[in-house]
C-alpha cells in the first residue's frame, strides 16, 4: 500500500475525497500525513476527523524555501512517504522536494492546462465565455501548473450556467479524476 502525503492549504474537499477512497480500498494507498501551511485551514479539521496526522508548517518561520522544505522532507522521510499529492496547496514546490521525489509529486488544477494556469481559473474561463473548461492532473515541476499532464477531463459550460453551478460541477469532477489517477498510480 502506497504511503501518501497530501499537501493542502484550504478547504480540503479533494483531500477528503482521496482519504475516503483510500479508506474504502478504491485506492491502494493510505494518506499518512497532511502537510498544511495555513494553521486555520479547514482541511486540518477534516484530517483530524479522519485520524490523519497533520503537520502544520509555516513558511514565514524559515529563512527561505529550501529551509522550509527541508523540515517537511525530514517529516516525509521519517514516515516513509512515497507519493506527494498536492490538493489546493498554494505554493510552488522547490528543488529540495522535487529532487527528493522525482515524478512522485502530482497536482490537480481546475482548467484544461496549459489554458488558465494560476489563480481563479474557473472564474476566468467562465467570464471569458468559454464553452468548455475542465480539470487537469499533472506531475509537478518548478513552474506554476506547468508539469507533464497525466489526465484531463472536459467540463462543458452551458449558456444558462452560473459560476456557482460550474464551480460545483468542477469540484465534483476534480474529486472523481483525482481518485481515478491515484487508483492507477498506486497499482504500480
Ligand atoms: C481545487 O480547485 C484544486 O484544483 C485547486 O485548489 C482547489 C482546492 O480545493 N488546486 P479543495 O481544498 O480540495 O476543496
Image (tube, rainbow, N blue to C red):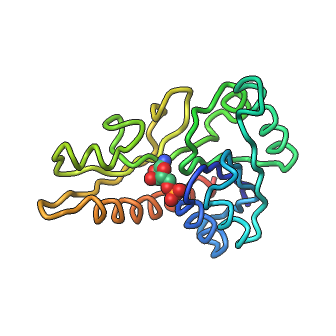
Query: Left of 31 or right of it: where is 9?
Result: left
- Relative to 97, say whether 160 is above or below: below
- Relative to 148, say whether 84 is above or below: below
**Which residue sits at x=45%, y=64%?**
176
Q: Position of residue 168 (x, y in %)?
A: 36, 65
On the image, which quarter does residue 15 sit in? bottom right
**Which residue sits at x=75%, y=55%?**
33
- Relative to 69, say whether 160 is above or below: below
**Which residue sits at x=48%, y=42%?**
138
Total of numbered circles in the picture?
Answer: 0
Q: As drawn, which residue projects farthest toward the bottom? A: 24
- Relative to 166, say whether 78 is above or below: above
Q: As drawn, which residue projects farthest toward the left? A: 159
Comparing 177 with 126, the one in front is 126
Q: Position of residue 146 (x, y in %)?
A: 45, 31
On the image, which quarter does residue 167 sit in? bottom left
Comparing 176 with 65, the one in front is 65
Q: Position of residue 20 (x, y in %)?
A: 61, 71
Query: Left of 148 or right of it: where is 72?
Result: right
* Quadrant of the snapshot with the N terminus: bottom right
Q: Position of residue 66 (x, y in %)?
A: 74, 25
**Which residue sits at x=33%, y=49%?**
122
Amino acid at each position: 500500500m502506497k504511503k501518501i502525503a497530501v499537501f493542502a492549504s484550504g478547504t480540503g474537499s479533494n483531500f477528503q475525497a482521496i482519504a475516503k477512497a483510500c479508506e474504502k480500498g478504491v485506492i491502494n494507498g493510505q494518506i499518512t500525513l497532511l502537510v498544511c501551511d495555513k494553521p486555520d485551514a479547514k482541511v486540518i479539521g477534516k484530517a483530524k476527523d479522519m485520524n490523519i496526522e497533520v503537520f502544520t508548517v509555516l513558511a514565514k518561520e524559515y529563512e527561505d524555501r529550501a529551509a522550509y522544505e527541508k523540515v517537511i522532507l525530514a517529516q516525509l522521510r521519517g514516515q516513509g512517504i512515497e507519493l506527494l499529492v498536492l490538493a489546493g496547496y498554494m505554493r510552488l514546490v522547490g528543488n529540495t522536494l522535487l529532487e527528493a521525489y522525482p515524478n512522485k509529486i502530482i497536482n490537480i488544477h481546475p482548467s484544461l492546462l496549459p489554458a488558465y494556469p494560476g489563480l481563479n481559473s474557473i472564474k476566468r474561463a467562465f467570464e471569458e465565455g468559454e464553452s468548455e473548461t475542465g480539470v487537469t492532473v499533472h506531475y509537478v515541476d518548478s513552474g506554476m501548473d506547468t508539469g507533464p499532464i497525466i489526465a484531463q477531463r472536459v467540463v462543458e459550460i452551458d449558456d444558462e450556467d452560473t459560476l456557482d453551478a460550474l464551480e460545483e460541477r468542477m469540484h465534483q469532477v476534480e474529486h472523481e479524476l483525482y481518485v481515478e489517477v491515484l487508483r492507477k498510480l498506486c497499482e504500480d
